[in-house]
Amino acid sequence: MAHPSAQHLLDCPNEQLRLAGLSHNKALAVRDLAAKTLDGTVPTLARIRKMSDAAIIEHLTQVRGIGQWTVEMFLIFRMGRPDILPVNDYGVRKGFALTFGKLKAADKVTPADLPKPAEMEARAKKWHPWCSVASGYLWRACDLAAVEKQK
């Protein structure tokens, strides 16, 4: 089965989107994505491959329901961009606190335990151009802490 085109999604009745399992807000987001794809706000994948990370974030966050975190995950996992540090990602922040802070595996995490983006960005100056790899290690620190906590 072929994927629906942007125009097909715009033409699709609301009832059909609801029957497909989309909430009202999700349907609005899908329609906005379709409209912004047609008007060029959302670049083609070929064009995205040639764009800077910042430009991609700027374009895609104009779509309802797509924030910076979503675009950062797209850049890391779909586009394979090597230098993305999602400083607002809970797992990255927790992994940072486990690795560089005073947080221990057995500790209950509170918002005060998590680093601020500026602290993470300062340390990440050493990690460029491989911040995506560092992010992976920080996520892994959370996995290892969870295993340690179970012992």
Image (spheres, grey):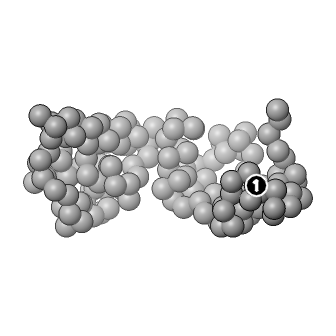
Q: Amino acid at mark 1?
A: Leu
Identify residue for label 1. 19
Residue 48 visible within the image: yes
**Residue at the spot 74% in from the left edge and 51% down from the top edge:** 20
Q: Is residue 9 left or right of residue 137?
A: right
Q: Position of residue 109 (x, y in %)?
A: 20, 58
**Residue at the spot 88% in from the left edge and 54% down from the top edge:** 7
Q: Position of residue 59 (x, y in %)?
A: 65, 59
Residue 36 visible within the image: no
Tell me the SS state at disc 1.
helix
Q: Is residue 131 left or right of residue 40?
A: left
**Residue at the spot 58% in from the left edge and 49% down from the top edge:** 52
* Residue in the foreground of this view, choosing between 71 and 107: 107
Quarter of the picture holding the N terminus: top right
**Residue at the spot 38% in from the left edge and 59% down from the top edge:** 88
Q: Position of residue 146 (x, y in %)?
A: 22, 40
For residue 3, above or below residue 30: above
Sort mark 1 into few (<14), some (14-19) or many (20+) by Cα contacts within 10 Å. Answer: few
Q: Position of residue 139 (x, y in %)?
A: 32, 41
For residue 148, above or below residue 102: above
